[in-house]
Amino acid sequence: MAVSGAAAAFALNALLHLPLMLALFLWKRISESSRLPPERFSRAIVSGVRYITNSPSIKIVLTRSAVIGVLGGAITALMPLVVRDLLRAGAQTYGIMLSAFGLGAVIDALITELRKRMSGEAAIRACALSMGGAAAAVALSREPVLTASRWSWRAPCG
């Protein structure tokens, strides 16, 4: 972007989406007709909420997802402020912090086998602990290298 500008980046992005749009347009999807009568939208919402309230396991999954999603989103949204106010740095350091998320994704791909050996509950707990520890370390850190390493810990979880 520094060489060609934002307009060229957006143009390239649009150009690279053309094959996907063409594939979706040419896709011959076979739709199956439902044997059930159509359901009104409001009634479907009520049925879904009733299902959730009567299913403890779904409630647990949705609660965890909401908490991790809100906290994970807040961490990502506050990253520019962390860079500017805590690290007293600029755009280059912000780019390094963003790349730390990419490094976290690579680490996540490398430790997939380890997570496969864990139960679902153990993996979720490990993820929550690593996210919490990473957030605390970022809040206390004043060094870009330490902060970037903590961002990469958080990336595999969310």
Image (tube, rainbow, N blue to C red):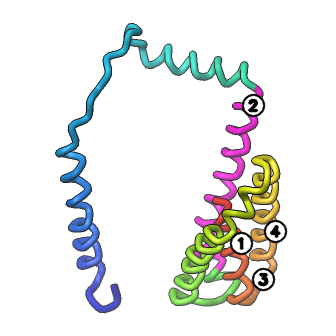
Amino acid carrying label 4: it is Gly
**Callout 3, which amino acid?**
Ser
Name the residue at 28% across, 69% down. Answer: 13
In-image side of 125 versus 6 (left or right) = right
Three-letter amino acid code of the residue under disc 1: Trp
Range drawn in magenta: 56-82
Residue for badge 1: 153
Q: Nearer the viewer, mark 2 or mark 4?
A: 2
- Left or right: where 69 falls relative to 114: left
Would you say the residues marked 3 and 4 are in contact, meaning their CB atoms lie under 8 Å apart?
no
Reading the image, the residue beneath label 4 is 133
The answer for how far apart the CA atoms under marks 2 and 3 are is 37 Å
- Mark 2 = which residue? 57
Between the C-alphas of marks 1 and 2, the distance is: 28 Å
In the rendered structure, are the residues bearing label 1 and label 2 in contact, judged by CB atoms less than 8 Å apart? no
Q: What residue would you read off at disc 3?
A: 141
Please identify the dominant SS of the magenta region: helix
**In the depicted structure, whether residue 96 falls above or below residue 105:** below
